[in-house]
Each structure stands twice: as C-alpha cells, then as structure tokens.
Amino acid sequence: MSRLITLRDALREAMSEEMRRDPNVFLMGEEVAQYNGAYKVSKGMLDEFGPKRVIDTPIAELGFAGIGVGAAMNGLRPIIEFMTWNFAVLAFDQIVNNAAKTLSQSSGEFGCPIVFRGPSGAAGQLAQQHSQTFESWLGNCPGLKVISTIDPYDSKGLMKAAIRDDNPICFMESESYYGLQGEVPEEEYLIEIGKAAIRKAGTDITIVSFNKMMEVIKQAAVELEKEGISAEIIDLRTIRPMDYDTVIQSVKKTNRLIVVDESWPFAGISAELAYVVQKRAFDYLDAPVARINSADTSLGYAPTMVTEYLPNADRVVKCAKELLYIVK
C-alpha cells in the first residue's frame, strides 16, 4: 500500500530503514543531529539511533568526508550529508582521490562503500557560490556512481540501493524540491542503480533530463500535447552508470532527441548523451540532437538573472518545434 509523502520524508525513511537493518550504517554531517538536518531530512533520527550513529560535525567538509572514507575502508557504511554540493568542493580530495580510487588502488582487496548526499543545482537567489550543478563534475570520475533525482519514490528506492552498494556513490538532491510529494509504498523496495525511467510514452520526440529539470520537461510535454505533439519523457535518475539503451530505444521510435541539463553546456551531461546517441543511433535521427543547458556563466543573485539562466519549458517547446520543422 502506498501513501503520499515528501522527498525529505522518503530520504529519511530510506536511511532509517537501512540503519535499522544494518548496524554498520551511520549518518554524519553538519547539523544532521541536534538540528534535524538543514532541510529536516534527518528529523527524529538522533532520537532513534543516538549520537554514535547520527553525528554532528564541525563546518569542515574535507575533515568529516575523510572520516567517512576511512570508516568505509574499515567496514562501515557511512552516509555523509553535505549541506549543499557547493560546499562539497572542499571535500573533493577525499571523494575523487580517495573514495573513488580505493578499490582500484588496492587491486580489489578493499572498497569504500559510502554515500555522499546533498542538494545540487540552483535553488532561487543563492548566487554564484551556492547554485552550481555537480553531476557532470562527479560523473566524469571513474570509480564513482552518481544518482540524481527528486522523485520521492525513486529517491527512497535508489537511496536504499546506494547504501547497500559496495561502491562510493554521490546522491544529488534539490533544495527546491524537498517538499515535493509523491506516492511511496509502505513495503520495502529497491530500485536498480543505472536504470532510467520512462515517465511518459510518446511518438514524435524524446526529451530527456534528470533532477529538478524533470519538472521543466513535464511542463513542456503538456504544452506540446496541446499542439498535437507527442513527447516521450525520460528521467535518467542515474548519471553514472548512464542508461544509454533506454534513451536510444526511444530515439529509434521518435527519431528526435532533446537533452535538458541544468549543468553548464561545456562538457556537460547533455554533451555526453548527445555524442553516444548520434554514434549509436545516427541512422534513426531525422534532426540533430538538441541540448538545452543553463547559461555558460556563473549564476548571479538577481531574480531576473535566475529566470534567464535556467532552462525553462518555453525553451523546450520552441526547440521541439524546431526539430519537428514546425518553426524556424
């Protein structure tokens, strides 16, 4: 039986269930204990699990990420919360140089089963140093798995799978959507890492995205439907490993593809996906693969700049019509 819960509740349920199941799992980060988490994701977890398993840290991302990596190397399964992935830049040495390379550097003798989690991307007027999108940065690093979703059902199932996975995982959330509600079953379930989800079947064009840009392309699909254009909507959910096959099978049906990606355009997720699709499905394409990204600049504070910076439904609709040769 399912019920309607928020993204923050789904994440909390996933972590709590795994901590009850496995005593080696613990949560650590800034304000996760006494304050119940900066976004209240860990509300009540300190009361249930105590201060040895829900651990408040100083504002020292490199330090507590390193403690987590060391704990994972020694058999524990840490969940490291970053208040935002913008702050995790301070911990990239531990994430990229240690966690990602432990298995290969030890010739498979020991791994680093750790989950780094927190919000990625813009969230209103947070300006340049708090609005960056890190999926493409982290997805570029061999040894890391990268999950990026805001759907409550997916987030719970993927978080549980991530905690049980023996590889280091970066779990990307969104500050803007912790209150997003969705149907989530009461019974236990896991979602396989590396599998995309078709959110809406369509015949005329494929539109792919992830994280909060899914809300943008869903809105665009509704507008396109009003004009008789049937868009197939795909949520990548996992950035690395990426489910190329689901996207390519869709493109073979629709013959057109738009990738909407909040990352900067240079070397972004959209560039990777566009390359693979044109390589593996070139003969099926009736138009070039289109990419819609955030502006190639840092995001300023002004609300008008935020609006212009991010991809939006109008841009997606216009792009779809261009690929269908309806407008120029």
Image (cartoon, rainbow, N blue to C red):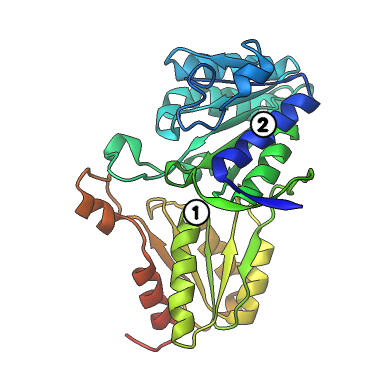
| Discs 2/1, front | 2
Residue at 64% across, 73% down = 250
Secondary structure category for the residue under label 1 = helix
Is residue 275 visible in the rendered image? The answer is yes
Secondary structure category for the residue under label 2 = helix
Q: Which residue is mark 2?
A: 15
Residue at 33% across, 56% down = 310
Q: Which quadrant holds residue 216?
A: bottom left
For residue 48, side relative to residue 328 (left or right): right
In the rendered image, the quadrant that contains the C terminus is bottom left
Type of amino acid at the residue the image marks with label 1: Ile
Type of amino acid at the residue the image marks with label 2: Met
* Mark 2, other Cα within 10 Å: few <14 / some 14–19 / many ≥20: many
Residue at 34% across, 36% down = 130
For residue 50, side relative to residue 207 (left or right): right
Q: Which quadrant holds residue 144?
A: top right
For marks 2 and 1, the one nearer the N-term is 2
Percent coordinates x, y for residue 315 in the rendering: 35, 70
Percent coordinates x, y for residue 13 in the rendering: 67, 36
Percent coordinates x, y for residue 248 in the rendering: 64, 69
Residue at 54% across, 49% down = 150
* Mark 2 and mark 1: Cα distance apart in space: 28 Å
Q: Which residue is mark 1?
A: 269
